[in-house]
Amino acid sequence: MDHLDELEAQSIYILREAFARLKKLALLWSLGKDSNVMIWLARKAFFGRVPFPALHVDTGKKFPEMYAFRDRYAREWDLDLRVDPCPPIDSVDPTLPPAARSAARKTEGLKLALVKHGFDGLIAGIRRDEEATRAKERVFSPRGLEGEWDVRDQPPEFWDHFNASPPQGAHLRIHPILHWTEADIWAYTKRENIPIIPLYLAKDGKRYRSLGDADITFPVASTASDIDEILTELEDTKVPERAGRALDHETEDAFERLRVAGYL
Amino acid sequence: MNMILPSAISATPNGTTRPQVRIVIVGHVDHGKSTLVGRLLHETGSLPDGKLEMLKAVSARRGMPFEWSFLLDALQTERDQGITIDTTQIRFRTRSRDVVLIDAPGHAEFLRNMITGAAQADGAVLIIDALEGVRDQTRRHGYLLHLLGIKQVAVVVNKMDRVDFSAERFDEISDEISAHLTGLGVKPSAVIPISARDGDGVAAHTPRIGWYKGPSVVEALDALEPARPAETLPLRLPVQAIYKFDDRRIIAGRIESGSLKAGDEIVIMPAGKIARIRTVESWPVTPLQGPQTAGRSVGITLDRELFIERGDVIGHVGQSPRDTRRIHARIFWLHDKPLSKGDQILIRLGTRETRASVVAIDKAVDPGALSNKETNSIARNHVGEIDISLAQPIAADPYSESARTGRLVIEVNGRIAGGGLVLSVDAGQRAMPIDIVPVESALHGGERSARYRHSGAVLWFTGLPGSGKSTLALALERRLFTNGGSPILLDGDTLRAGLNSDLGFSPKDRSENIRRLAEVATHLARNGHIAIVAAVSPAAADRAAARRIADSAFREIYVATPAEICESRDPKGHYAKARAGRLPSFTGITNDYEPPGASELTIDTSSRSVADAVNEIERMLARTGILFEEVADLAANI
């Protein structure tokens, strides 16, 4: 087994545990490189068929290429796609800095979708190497009744035994690719020939390393025009992956506040 | 140092490969774990652009001197209080390794988070403050490393600047911690004097520690090896789920040890059902050819429809895990309420979940304390040994034989509250209430076997009705007795008249009939007798259950007389009755007999005499260590 085989086997194990232990699951599909890998892993875990809905909590502000990708592959991959809109900006905590406040719409949209569909488990494609508070996450991460993350009291989790009993009305986040890195995602995407949104590849000296809402996401300088070149670029870069995501950088704790409130 | 291993290799884009190793930093609160991690990232050039400036700004905002630990202490409360609350992970590279560094909190309050981090590690760095020396969390973390199965440990003595880089102070601490760890069966790979804040000993040897000749921290990390999947151990495939998305019935799980391939004969524990793997399923390519090895998440289909469920464990015939209802385990406890005798708990072992009760508690101590004062219950953050009685049988291994199927977690109110290692399992034993105390014989096994010239055994004759089981059993009984042995015949029909008179011929009753026969026979075998069982026993699973009960004393003799000859003999008139429709579910004509795949002996009575067959049985018993040799020789001359 090589490194990618090991990552894959662990993710499949986690997805199968989630499917076995929770009653009503959904996979959060943000259309980005990470959640595309996750859908691929789910197809592997369940022998070609994703046995739960793919939920897109739509801010309405994604890039057109992302919507095109969603509509095409939801069909091709035979996904049970659910698109749920986010509420207007007025309903979001006004003390958050502007970009974070904009992103927090997604948290509110997520809460509404949870109530509407009654999911007890949400599969999300976050990774430890993306961001410091995500590095502290559990694979099965309990959320409170309001979707909040109690970082001070996370349950112990070891030997691939997961806490999978959310209190009545609360839900769990399941993170099957928490242990992957950005380079792992690209190496696997290449190996498995998983389709990608072209925005990740360099055009006119710039490319997107991470995709979010069009108005608060910016490209980084790059000449990488295919996955091999992306991987070579990642070997030497000292620019963090989410450098182009404005919401991370407004204040020291902006992202933590978002996550504690239920953001991904 | 530069060894490249075939597994756990990280494929990097430029074609180079390096092993990935996961290392946890543990130790007492404030001894400098997060600082060491920050310094390691800096020294190896692994910090992203702007991070150093951010740390400076964050430190200045709090009116503190530059704080490396703010790099990992990502939560506001962690930075404000200057302590690590939850574990985190960060990556960097050494000359020959991709390292995943796991930072773990040192505060006793957050031991559950330390365990969460440390349980994922291949190796550990235990950090000790040179001024404060070994403290309670140092000892506790050392003990937990041992319980978590982490054998590679490097020790660093930090803050050497605060003891003027004194070699004497270093030696003192080095001796104390080395003795503690060695007592736990862990030998530190290095003990390194450092100043994480200033960088001495981290990546380079500085003049201030000129007296130290061992490796730097980076060199010590380079020497730690990634854990390798246990491919050479017996197969263990805990069942996660059974999927019926299409016309396939796929059993899904991850191979924890060993390997499997299509065509393998497997046994499903704890029920002991036997089947063959028909295909190994996958996506997008299916079926897969060739062996699948430890670490893989797989899906298999079987050659027959069996009841199988999440929590079962698949192994190879003859190398299966034990089925048990009673486990002895060494555990650590994390719940506020101490664990006490009589407590009802939930156990997770592999993918199995079962209710259990704590039957006994032994050696409960605080691993952080210097004295080993034992208590009656296991308090929070303490360790101890427990006997647990399970509500249903499970498949398990001792940790020493199979690490991944020999460890368990304990859940209280839906939350993990503890975990530990299976020290031993009582194979085939039903849970025994505390007030039942079995009385063993006054004689020990050797006394009887010295007189009888044989060991105790269960000889299991299986075969169609009329195949000659009883005839052979009677002849063998006479032969063994003549030679001074102690054979005892257990005939299936005879026992059905008494002990088993409440049982009919449904599959469930047949299983129970076999179980009782096996229990009685095993009791006789344990007391030195040779129990001769003659029973059709058509189900392979029932015979496998009998073999598990009798364990190493079991010898199966398949009386493989052709069916038409059996029917022509019809000694009890059953075939005739069945043909006339007056004997439902009679094995002779319903074709439900499952022939054994690997019995100790196969005999066809249509082609040989009874005496000849008995000779052959005796030779098998001598060959497999039941009959002592000279008796067998004597028998051969009769």
Image (spheres, coloured by chain):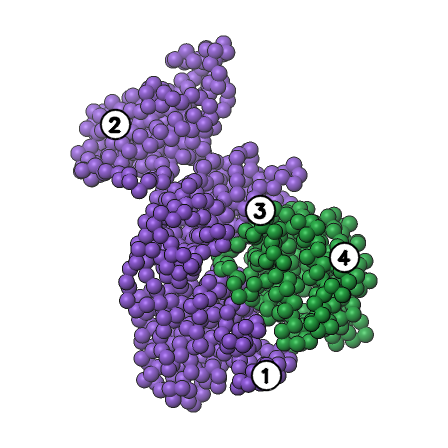
Helix, strand or loop for disc 4: strand
Q: Nearer the viewer, residue B521 or B596?
A: B521
Task: For marks 4 and 3, give the CA distance.
Answer: 29 Å
Q: Is residue A5 left or right of residue B237?
A: right
Which kind of residue does numbered mark 4 sit on?
Pro
Helix, strand or loop for disc 3: helix
Residue B460 rendering spot, x and y as whole percentages: 35, 29
Count neighbours of disc 3 (C-alpha within 10 A) and say few if under 14, some if 14 to 19, many if 20 or more.
Answer: some
Circles 3 and 1, Cβ within 8 Å, touching? The answer is no
Pair 3/2: label in front = 3
Q: Chain of mark 1?
A: B
Count neighbours of disc 1 (C-alpha within 10 A) and say few if under 14, some if 14 to 19, many if 20 or more.
Answer: few
Q: Which chain is purple?
A: B
**Residue B416 visible, this angle:** yes
Q: Nearer the viewer, residue B107 or A116?
A: A116
Q: Do the residues marked 4 and 3 share a common chain? A: yes
Circle 4 sits on which residue? A85
Which kind of residue does numbered mark 3 sit on?
Ala
Q: Chain of mark 4?
A: A
Circle 3 sits on which residue? A20
**Residue B559 visible, this angle:** no
Task: For marks 3 and 1, give the CA distance.
Answer: 47 Å
Quadrant holding the C terminus of chain B? top left
Instruction: Tell me the colour chain A is drawn in.
Output: green
Pair 2/4: label in front = 4
